[in-house]
């Protein structure tokens, strides 16, 4: 049976595209650089903050990289968190999952994940949160998922990972856990869903010990 359900953050727990757009465009504007394109947004949506800035500057002015990274580290991210929108039925799903089923997060966010959960009233809703700061290699490497499996002492077959991107798909496959693709039918997945409540049905359908 499923012992742990693992959630990606951006695109699964929250619609963060507006927040990401405003955040990175603010940084770019401070250095008189052009705003993000749709292709840029797709990249930063799944990347760490440092990886996103390296990518954006590689397409604009790589000589500014050190200055931009230093500026971003001084920025207060909290004002942008309020632009994130919780995905529909997330709270209901967390309530519906069996009590014994652990809830975890695997995210490429770093320092901001704690504030994200606190501001949106989700502190304590998850049994374990693994960010890019907690592993040597962020997604698409499987390190964060493997850390979660090890923490709860469960086998890959006893976990579900819910993600929305190719990065999530690769991470799940490398960790050999079942992958649930959320709102992205183009991904290869064990399940495709459009509503988070469907996860409860998937967990309930699994054979029990």
Image (tube, helix red, strand yellow):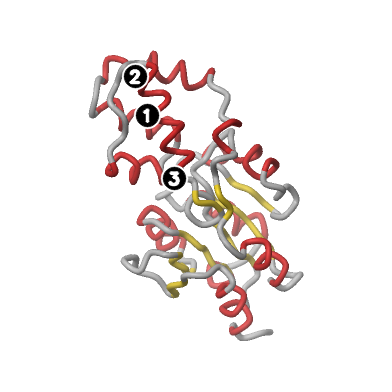
Residue 207 lies in quadrant: bottom right
* Mark 2, other Cα within 10 Å: few <14 / some 14–19 / many ≥20: some
Position of residue 172 relative to residue 129, above or below, is: below
Left or right of 209: which side holds 13? left
Asked if the residue under mark 3 is in contact with the one under mark 1, i.e. CB atoms within 8 Å, the reply is no
Where disc 3 sits, the SS reads: helix
Residue 103 x, y percent position in the rendering: 66, 60
The mark total stands at: 3
Kindly identify which numbered label has been placed on residue 188.
none
Mark 1 — residue? Answer: 53
In space, the residues marked 1 and 3 are separated at their CA atoms by 16 Å
Residue 83 x, y percent position in the rendering: 54, 41
Where disc 2 sits, the SS reads: helix
Where disc 1 sits, the SS reads: helix
Residue 176 x, y percent position in the rendering: 45, 66
Q: Residue at x 44, y 75 (%)?
A: 191
Position of residue 66 relative to residue 179, above or below, is: above
Q: Residue at x 40, y 63 (%)?
A: 173
Q: Residue at x 37, y 57 (%)?
A: 170
On the rendered image, what quadrant is the C terminus found in?
A: bottom right
In primary-sequence order, the first of circles 2 and 3 is 3
- Comparing 31 with 107, the one in front is 31
On the rendered image, what quadrant is the N terminus found in?
A: bottom right
Kindly identify which numbered label has been placed on residue 65.
2
In space, the residues marked 1 and 2 are separated at their CA atoms by 8 Å
* Mark 1, other Cα within 10 Å: few <14 / some 14–19 / many ≥20: many
In space, the residues marked 2 and 3 are separated at their CA atoms by 23 Å
Residue 78 lies in quadrant: top right
Asked if the residue under mark 2 is in contact with the one under mark 1, i.e. CB atoms within 8 Å, the reply is yes
Mark 3 — residue? Answer: 17
Question: Which of the two discs, 1 and 3, sits closer to the camera?
Answer: 3
């Amino acid at each position: 049976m499923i012992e742990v359900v693992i959630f990606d953050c951006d695109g699964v727990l929250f619609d963060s595209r507006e927040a990401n757009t405003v955040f990175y465009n603010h940084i770019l504007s401070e250095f008189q650089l052009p705003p993000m394109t749709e292709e840029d947004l797709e990249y930063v949506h799944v990347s760490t903050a440092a990886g996103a800035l390296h990518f954006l500057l590689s397409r604009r002015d790589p000589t500014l990289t050190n200055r931009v990274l230093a500026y971003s580290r001084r920025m207060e991210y909290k004002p942008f968190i309020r632009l994130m929108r919780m995905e529909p039925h997330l709270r209901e799903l967390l309530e519906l999952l069996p009590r014994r089923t652990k809830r975890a997060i695997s995210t490429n966010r770093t320092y901001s994940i704690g504030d994200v959960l606190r501001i949106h009233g989700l502190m304590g809703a998850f049994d374990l949160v693994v960010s890019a700061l907690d592993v040597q290699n962020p997604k698409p490497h499987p390190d964060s998922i493997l850390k979660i499996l090890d923490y709860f002492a469960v086998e890959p077959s006893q976990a579900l990972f819910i993600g929305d991107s190719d990065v999530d798909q690769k991470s799940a496959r490398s960790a050999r856990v079942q992958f649930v693709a959320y709102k992205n039918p183009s991904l290869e997945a064990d399940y495709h869903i459009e509503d988070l409540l469907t996860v409860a049905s998937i967990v309930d359908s699994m054979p029990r010990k």
